[in-house]
Amino acid sequence: MRKMIFSLSITFLFFLFTSTFSKANSLYKGDSIEMGADYANDVYYSLSQGEVAKEDRFTWDIAFRTNIMSSSILINGGSGVMLYTYPNGDTSSWMTVDTSGLFGWKAMNNHIKDWELGAFSAYAGIHPDYGWANYNSTTHNLIADSFFIIQLADQSFRKLWIIKKESSKNKYHFRYAMLDGSMDAVFVLDCNNYITKDFVAFSISDEAVNDRQPAKTDWDLLFTKYVDKVFMGPSPVDYPVMGILTNQGVHVARVSGQEESTYEDYMLEEFDSTSKSVIGRDWKKSAGMPPTFSMVDSLLYFVSDVNGAIYRLYFTDFVSGSTGLGKVVFNTKNLGGTSVYDTEGIKQAELLIYPNPASAGNLNLVLHSKENADIKLDLFDMLGQTVYSNTFEKNEGLSTIKLNSVSLEKGSYIARIQLNDQIIVQQFIIQ
């Protein structure tokens, strides 16, 4: 009976290792996406799975963050939506709107770095002022003290009043109408119906919810058109650009001055954990009129995806959406890394093996954890045989295990980390 259990265990390990090995053969990946003429589509992309979704950008005007603790409301700036706080009165002026001088009002835009700061919060102060509303400490609701004039993606105008957010119910109440007061309507949006998405969109002209975004755990990069500051003279102006934004929880390190196709020392680089626009738009440069584009030399990115894996990313070609397909061509390589999450999706531990592939005598295992516990490390070859085993002390935070003195022949191996009841398995290669 023991022989049978041992045999089954080895078979299972071999299946696990060979499955992991087959994935490792796809470490290098050349890919491209097409956004269409004038970048008409948003493309959601997963570094591990490829293109996830392609969505028509002109089908929504505003989008609400589904997180119950959030107050963020975006506008579709890349499609020409413009937002103005009504300057001539508070919500009591809803029926007597005066838009004279409208084009002299200052437009509001989504924050270029933070998903939590949508255009409606552009004039936010400190708590309890969230820009479009104030926080009520008794009910915990957000109650509007102003309303807006909005130019939609179809270039028509509406007045728009985000009446309140019922925080405990995660529901937004908002009102919209033509400037003359006609077609006045109130809509209640229950964000609980879209909680697997980060944002849910709404088309005011169609009076309809647009559930266009993939699940928040399914994508890393968004190829899109958005408003940024662009120099067209001595001072920057707000202008729609094509660029790449990152999902919440995706971290990026921007690296210049290194060879894109060979540099892999991501542990030497600083990852930005707060900005959604580290990749942005400046990986390409333009010249002439109409502009022709080329790639910025010696520029690459290390990207920690939604699952904690590290990828190298660099761009090789770009075809403008004004003259062609809006095509972006790029290369990625999976450099390793995996994560363990608790039941709420909070990252509890991460393992990075660096470099990978490694040369003999140059192997580091970097473990990040929220707890103190001894680390049990086992290394297996592709036959399931243990080639190394040891226990290390672990402090909360970052710990590095250097295996420079461990003698390993060329080939593929599996590292198995046990930290209390958490187990992380990661493949690496000695070359």
Image (tube, grey):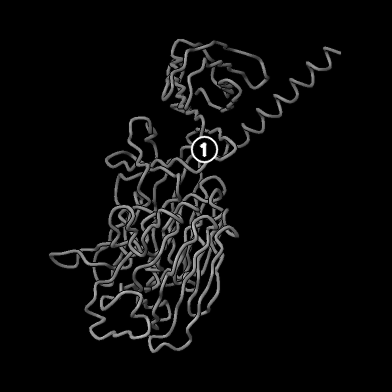
Kind of residue sitting beneath label 1: Ile
Residue at 39% in and 65% down? 225
Residue 211 falls left or right of residue 367: right
| Rendered image quadrant of residue 192 | bottom right
- Residue in the foreground of this view, choosing between 247 and 95: 95
> In which quadrant will I find the N terminus?
top right
Rendered location of residue 420, percent (x, y): 58, 20
Residue at 42% in and 87% down? 181
| Rendered image quadrant of residue 176 | bottom left
Residue at 25% in and 80% down? 103
- Residue in the foreground of this view, choosing between 364 and 368: 368
Against 403, residue 241 (above or below) is: below
Rendered location of residue 216, percent (x, y): 53, 51
- Residue in the foreground of this view, choosing between 345 and 257: 345
Against 87, residue 217 (above or below) is: above
Q: Which residue is mark 1?
A: 346
Against 319, residue 176 (above or below) is: below
Mark 1 surroundings within 10 Å by alpha-carbon count, few (fewer than 14), some (14 through 19), many (20 or more): few
Rendered location of residue 171, percent (x, y): 52, 62
Rendered location of residue 93, percent (x, y): 33, 80
Residue at 36% in and 60% down? 134
Q: Identify the residue at the far left of this view.
A: 234
